[in-house]
Image: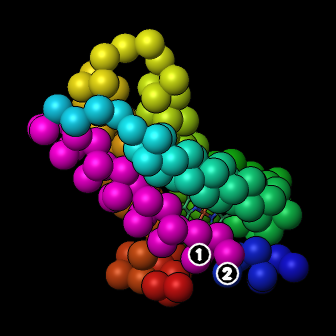
């Protein structure tokens, strides 16, 4: 089951990236053209939110049940984990940065419900999703990252 969920965690990254780029593009063009904030905009944000929250749940399971989270911290101690780039990345950096990104996505999605003018909705959504996307991009263990830390494209 762990391996299956790891594959799902890896695949969902692409779903999140595609939806985030789409949502950012839509809010940017909406902002520039002054078009209304539509049901379609809401739906894109909702799908992004669902994918991101699912990713966090799977990630939490991996962090608790797998070798690169709670286990490494309790076996090696926090000091040793912080000194090792791979254990530090998965045990501390990846989880912290990704949770911040998903909180930003959640706040960005919440903007749709607010009683504010549509151009402001587009603008706020744009910035929350853009910052979240940047954080995700720098926190994914891409294959070109340091040896031992980088993972496959899929
Ligand atoms: C948008 C959010 C996230 C994205 C895009 C993401 C992406 C990834 C990717 C691409 C991998 C490598 C998968 C592979 O080896 O094929 C990975 C591994 C991992 N992620 Fe995430 N992740 C996210 C959130 C989280 C969160 C919130 C946690 C912890 C609560 C987490 C915990 C882990 C752990 C522990 C691993 C390593 C698992 C192992 O190799 O046994 N991830 N993540």
Q: Residues within 10 Å of mark 2 (few under 14, many from 20)?
A: few
Residue 26 lies, in percent from the top left, at 29, 49
Specify few, some or many for label 1: CA neighbours under 10 Å numbering under 14, 14-19, or 20 or more: some
Q: Main secondary structure of the magenta part?
A: helix
The percent position of residue 127, horizontal first and vertical second, equals 29, 35
Q: Secondary structure at mark 1?
A: helix
Mark pair 1, 2: CA separation? 5 Å
Give residue 7's mark. 2
Residue 98 visible somewhere in the drawing: no
Pointers 1 and 2 in contact (CB under 8 A)? yes
Residue furthest top in the image:
115
Residue 91's quadrant in the figure? bottom right
Residue hosting label 1 = 10
Instruction: Give left or right: position of 3 versus 96.
Output: right
Q: Quadrant of the N terminus?
A: bottom right
Does the closest atom of ligand 1 sit within 8 Å of the Cβ of label 2?
A: yes
Nearest the viewer among 13 and 138 is: 13
- Ligand 1 under 8 Å from disc 1 Cβ: yes
Ligand 1 visible in quadrant: bottom right
The residue nearer to you, when weighing 142 against 51, is 51
Residue 150 drawn above or below residue 112: below
């Amino acid at each position: 089951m762990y391996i299956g969920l790891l594959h799902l965690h890896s695949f969902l990254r692409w779903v999140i990236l595609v939806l985030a780029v789409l949502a950012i593009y839509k809010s940017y063009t909406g902002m520039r053209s002054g078009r209304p904030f539509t049901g379609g905009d809401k739906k894109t944000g909702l799908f992004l939110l669902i994918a991101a929250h699912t990713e966090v749940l799977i990630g939490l399971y991996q962090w608790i049940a797998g070798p690169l989270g709670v286990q490494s911290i309790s076996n090696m101690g926090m000091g040793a984990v912080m000194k090792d780039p791979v254990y530090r990345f998965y045990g501390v950096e990846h989880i912290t940065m990704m949770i911040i990104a998903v909180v930003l996505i959640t706040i960005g999605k919440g903007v749709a419900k607010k009683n504010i003018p549509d151009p402001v909705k587009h603008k706020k959504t744009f910035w929350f999703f853009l910052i979240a996307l940047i954080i995700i991009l720098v926190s994914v263990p891409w294959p070109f990252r340091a040896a031992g830390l980088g993972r496959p494209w899929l």
